[in-house]
Amino acid sequence: MATIVMVVGLPTVGKSCIVKRFLGDGTAVSALSNYVPTKFDIYTRSIMTNYGEAKVEIFDTAGMSNSLAHRDALYSKANGFLLVFSLTDLCSFHDLESIKKRIDITTPNASIILVGNKNDVLDQKRQVRHEDAVRCSKEWGCQYVETSALLDYNIDTAFKELVTVIKSKQTVPAKAKKKCKLMRLFSGFGHCH
Ligand SMILES: Nc1nc2c(ncn2[C@@H]2O[C@H](COP(=O)(O)OP(=O)(O)OP(=O)(O)O)[C@@H](O)[C@H]2O)c(=O)[nH]1
Ligand SMILES: [Mg+2]
């Protein structure tokens, strides 16, 4: 079964460029002036994790707000979220708080990763301090990674880290599996899978 990863965040933070980079489409990203707001796109790519190969379905969502019901229905399908903000836009960082709250309601078991994109920009343009993003990620119990879709920096890492966390939650430890097998043998019933 495919792992569904949803890429969320305000418009223009670079979600689609991140997704295109991840899919290996560098040409689309180098044309930095070509901004086309996303409606909704789904892509797939397989990646290797410590838990084997994972088929990932990537949902590139619209930064522009949809109806709440639509957003909730979409979120509830996800195994994990890339919560993306732009390092050049403080609002995009603060806005993730409401998205995170929504995820906690719709998809409490989903894994998340906090992504600060556009880290290629000069220091003067930076509006979000590294330590503030780290503090936020600690509060949310997730990892924080800085990326640049422009330079193809840390894009694969962000997806891999997230999918690895998702897979680690889905994988039953070998010890527990053994215990289940023994219980089945002795009880004659098969409650464990
Ligand atoms: N400097 C810099 N610019 C970037 C980077 N990633 C994206 N951009 C630019 O940011 C703008 C918006 O990028 P998109 O990927 O379309 O943004 P989005 O988050 O998908 O926007 P919506 O689809 O409207 O939600 C474009 O002009 C990109 O070229 C990056 O890593 N560095
Ligand atoms: Mg987009």
Image (tube, helix red, strand yellow):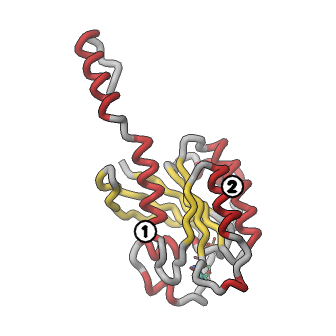
| The residue at label 2 has a CB less than 8 Å from ligand 1 | no
Q: Secondary structure at mark 2?
A: helix
> In the drawing, what numbered circle is on residue 156?
1
Q: Is residue 106 visible?
A: yes
Residue found at x 52% / y 50% = 78
Residue 135 point in image, percent of width and height: 68, 57
Q: Is residue 78 left or right of residue 92?
A: left
Residue 185 point in image, percent of width and height: 23, 15
Q: Nearer the viewer, residue 50 or 189?
A: 50
- Above or below: residue 86 compared with residue 67: below
Q: Residue furthest front?
A: 131
Q: Is residue 182 left or right of residue 29?
A: left
**Mark 1: few, some, or many residues within 10 Å (few <14, many ≥20)?**
some
Q: Secondary structure at mark 1?
A: helix
Q: Nearer the viewer, residue 166 or 58?
A: 166
Residue found at x 43% / y 83% = 26
> In the drawing, what numbered circle is on residue 28?
none
Residue found at x 45% / y 50% = 165
Residue hosting label 2: 99
Q: Closer to us: mark 1 or mark 2?
A: 1
Residue found at x 63% / y 84% = 121
Quarter of the image for residue 182 reads top left
Count of number-bearing discs: 2
Instruction: Quote the CA–CA distance across marks 1 and 2.
Output: 23 Å
Q: Is residue 43 left or right of residue 18?
A: left
Mark 1 vs 2, N-terminal side: 2
Residue 62 point in image, percent of width and height: 62, 66
Residue 116 point in image, percent of width and height: 61, 69
Q: Disc 1 marks which amino acid? A: Asp
Q: Disc 2 marks which amino acid? A: Ile
**Mark 2: few, some, or many residues within 10 Å (few <14, many ≥20)?**
some
